[in-house]
Image (tube, grey):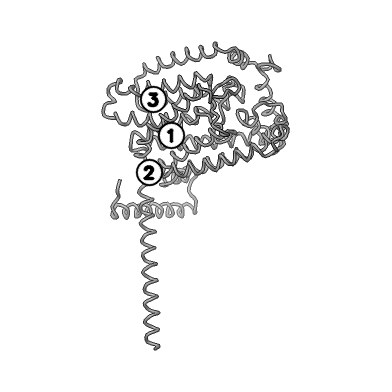
Amino acid sequence: MAVTSRGASTYRAGLVDSAAASRGAAARRGGRLPAGRAVARLLERPLTTYYLIIIPAVLLLAVGLGEVLSASSVISYAQGSGSYSVFVRQALWAGLGLVAAVVAARVPPRVLRGASWPLLLGAVTLLALTYTALGWSVNGNRNWLRLGGLQLQPSEMAKPALILWGASVIATKERLLHSWRHLLLPFIPGCLLVLALVLGQGDAGTGLVFMTAILGMLFLVGVPRWFFGVGAVAIAAGVAGLVAARPSRMQRVLTFTDPFAHPDGSGYQAVHSIYALSTGGWWGVGLGASREKWGLLPEANSDFIFAIIGEELGFIGALVVLGLFALLGYAGLRIAARADTLFIRLAAGGITIWLVAQLIVNVGAALALLPIAGVPLPLVSAGGSSLLTTLAAVGVLAGFARREPGARLYLQARRARRARRAREKAAERRREKQADRTGSAGGE
C-alpha cells in the first residue's frame, strides 16, 4: 500500500507528539513511567513485533549452538569424528538458515502466495521419494532422504510449505468462506495427502504437529465448532491406530506415566531425562558440565536437548528458554491478530501454532509429561533440516511484522527521511565544490 508524503509526515508528527506527551507525563511523575504504562508504550512502538521475533529467535539459536556443542562433543569424540563435528555441521546449517531467514523476510506476501503451490509440490515430491530406494530409516522411521552426501528430512520442509499453501488457497476463497465446502476444499484433501505421506513414514510425532497446525488454521478462519468435534474423534482414532500399529509406541504410551517402572527398558530415556533435569537444580551444574551427555541420555543433542539445558543451566536457564519461546509465540499471534490480509493472518498463525505445538511435544517428553514423540526443539536441537526450515519460517514472520500497518508507515517515513538527508548532503557537497571552484578562479 502506497503512503503519501503527507500521510508519512502526519505519522511522524504523531510519533513526535506521543513521545513529547510521554516525556511530559514522566517529568510530572519524577521522570519515570509506571511499569505497566512503560510496557504498554513499548508495545505500541511500530517495530516492537519485529524485534519480538528477531531477538528471541537469535538468542534461542545461540543457546542451541552452545548446547549442541556441549551435548554432542563426548559422543562425537567417542565415535572418532572429532568433538566438534556435530557442532560445525550445525553451525553451517545455522548460517544457511540465517541467509534463508533474511531472504524470506524480504519476500513480499504476494510472492509467497505465488510460490506456495511449487513449494507444496516440491515437499510432496520429496516426501514421496522417501518411499523409494533413496529413503533412509532412522530409529524405525523412514523419514530421511540420502541425496549423495546430503541427508534431508522432507517432513520438516513440508511444514512451512503446507502452511503457506493452506493460507494461500483459503485467502483466495475469502469471499466464499461463508460456505464450509469452499472453506474445506481443496485445503483438507491437500493436508490429508501430506499427512498420509508423513504418517506412512512412521513419524507419529511430526504427524501430530501437522494435525495441530491444520486445526489451528481452521480455527483462525472460523470453521464451525462441530468440525472440531469430528476432527478430535478422527485424530484420537488415528493416534490410537498408530500407537497400536507398533509395539514400541504402545510401550512408550504405557510407561510414560511411570517410567521408573521400566528404568532399563522403555522408560530409560525418560528416566535419564528426569535425572538430568533434577541434577541441574536452580542454577545448573555449568555449561559443558553435564553428566548425562556422557552416553547416558540417548539423543542428548537433539530430541532431549531440553534436559541437557535444564541440567547445565538449571531451572532458571530452562525457564529463560521457555520465556524466549513465549515471546516468540506472542509475537506470532500478535502478527496474526493485527494483520490486514487473511493470508498473513493464517500464515502467521499457522507458523506460530506449528512452533508452539512442537515445543510442547518436545518439552513434554523431556519432562515425562507426554510420551516420547521424537520431535526436535525448534531453533535449539541439532538437525539441519529442522533448523533451516524453522529459521526460514522465522524470517517469514519477521517480514510480516515489518508489514504491519504502523510498521509499514514508520519504515516508509524513515526511508523518506534518509533519502532527504542524502539529497541534502549531496546538495551541500555540490555547493562546497562550487565554492572551491569560485575561490580558485578568484585567486587566479
Q: Secondary structure at mark 2?
A: loop
Residue located farthest toward the bottom when viewing the structure as drawn: 444
- Please give the label number shown on residue 419: none
Q: Relative to residue 212, is residue 26 depicted above or below?
A: below
User: Crowding near pointer 3: few (<14 within 10 Å), some, many (20+)?
Assistant: some
Q: Relative to residue 49, is residue 427 depicted above or below?
A: below
Q: Which residue is mark 3?
A: 219
Nearer-N-terminus badge (2/1): 1
Camera-nearest residue between 333 and 69: 69
Q: Which residue is mark 1?
A: 333
Q: CA distance from mark 3 to mark 1?
A: 13 Å
Q: Secondary structure at mark 1?
A: helix
Camera-nearest residue between 190 and 311: 190
Camera-nearest residue between 307 and 442: 442
Nearer-N-terminus badge (3/2): 3
Measuring from the top left, give residue 36's x and y in whole percent. Answer: 47, 42
Q: Secondary structure at mark 3?
A: helix
Nearer-N-terminus badge (3/1): 3
**Horizontally, is 251 left or right of 207 in the view?**
right
Rendered-image quadrant of the C terminus: bottom left
> Which amino acid lies under the numbered mark 1 shown in the image of this protein?
Leu
> Which amino acid lies under the numbered mark 2 shown in the image of this protein?
Arg
Q: Could you tell me which residue is drawn at 35 percent across and 27 percent down?
A: 221
> Which amino acid lies under the numbered mark 3 shown in the image of this protein?
Phe
Q: Which residue is mark 2?
A: 403
Residue located farthest toward the left when viewing the structure as drawn: 175
Measuring from the top left, give residue 172's x and y in whole percent. Answer: 30, 31
